[in-house]
Amino acid sequence: MRQETRRCLELDRAHCWHPFTPQDDWCSTDFEPIAIARGQGVWLFDTENRRYFDGNSSIWTNIHGHAHPHITAAIQRQAETICHSSFLGYTHPLAAELAEKLTRLLPGQPMERVFFSDNGSTAIEVALKMALQYRQQTGEPERNGFIAFVNGYHGDTLGAASIGGVSRFFDRFRGPGHPLHQISSIEDLHQLPEEIVRSTAGLVIEPLIQGVNQMRPWPPGTLAELRRWSTANGIHLILDEVMTGFGRTGKMFACQHENVVPDFLCLAKGLTGGYLPLAATLTTQEIYDAFRGPAENAFYYGHSYTANPLGCAAALASLEVFESEKTLEMLQPKLATFSSRLEALGNQSPQIKEIRQVGLIAGIELHSHPTRSGKSVCQLAMKHGLSTRPILDTIVIMPPLCTTESELDFVFEALQSSLNESGH
């Protein structure tokens, strides 16, 4: 083990606290964490210079690959100018330009206003608070609750957690959060009591596919029906496209598959190509106008790093790469390859219970077994140069959009080898 690796692990175990991680397992002497030192394209390299395919896009963020020269250069140029200035009381050219470009990405009914924040959780917080304050300022203060879906995941800040549906993450935080009514399906929605409907400010969903719920797609037409129902009942539709945005599903946004424009569109992760923390909540001019007038109507919410210039530079560069490299156009044949390789994997691997896919997002669920688990298969995959994480016994495969077909071959060969070695 190199001295650099040894020092990193010693300091980490002494001082770091990792997310979603049982710390006794992490600090066990039987476990040796991987220390990532650099990235290039779809590959990660650890401090021992071992190479791994970035099979979940660094927790669903990376779009164009690591160290992309265009994005890297944009960040470097901006760093030489200014790294941060306040967006409270000031503006800057990159934020203004990025806001304009984001509002033009959804055709049809425009979403003309952009509120910047830091991450997916805060993008959701912004939408929830705007939806509530909008009702207070338009004569409907009784509309103070939300509808969300069982097993949904919308972030970990207190407001976002209160509408989450994954019990192991959120049950202990229910009390202080927003009033919530959870549903499982469109059928549940249509059976809601009228008093629930009348007291609801917004309906929140991860469009096309739930992420943390082991990558489970919605039935076709779900999103279009939610738009119809929410419009008919005067309820704001809030789309959490933190995971699905920026090409993951084969279109720029998942909602475009069903020609739906929401009242709030929440973006993060891939917004900067996966390079820097930045989030955006898009909404309509009608909602924005309700916050004009006297000072007490203002939206008193924000973060120190709102509209951070480095993040805006990365986001603009990422959108430029979408255009210059024709990312969405070049993605289409890869989606066909991805689907065929998933099908072949399922046919060859009796350990697999079900494969669920939307675009370049896949969840490979394993049959329950006393010694084989999603975690153990992912640990084997690391030995074959594939880095990813399971959700329970579902292995997540979400490669960067720039992945080549030969690199996809590598992914599925590593998966097949890992499944074979897991035995049983």
Image (tube, rainbow, N blue to C red):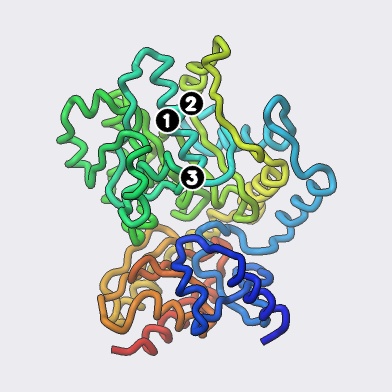
Marker disc for residue 284: 2
- Could you say whether the residue bearing mark 1 is in a helix, strand or loop? loop
SS type, badge 2: loop
Residue 288 screen position, x and y as percent: 51, 21
At horizontal 28% and vertical 89% (from top left) the residue drawn is 424
Examine the rendered structure and indicate whether residue 423 appears above or below residue 299: below
Q: Residue furthest top?
A: 294
Q: Position of residue 72 (x, y in %)?
A: 73, 57
- Amino acid type, label 3: Ser
Q: Nearer the viewer, residue 25 or 53?
A: 25
CB atoms of marks 2 and 1 within 8 Å: yes
> In the image, 140: left or right of 269?
left
Look at discs 2 and 3 and give the one toward the viewer: 3
What residue do we see at 38% from left, 37% from top?
A: 260
Q: Residue furthest front?
A: 14
The residue identified by callout 1 is 263
First in sequence: mark 3 vs mark 1: 3
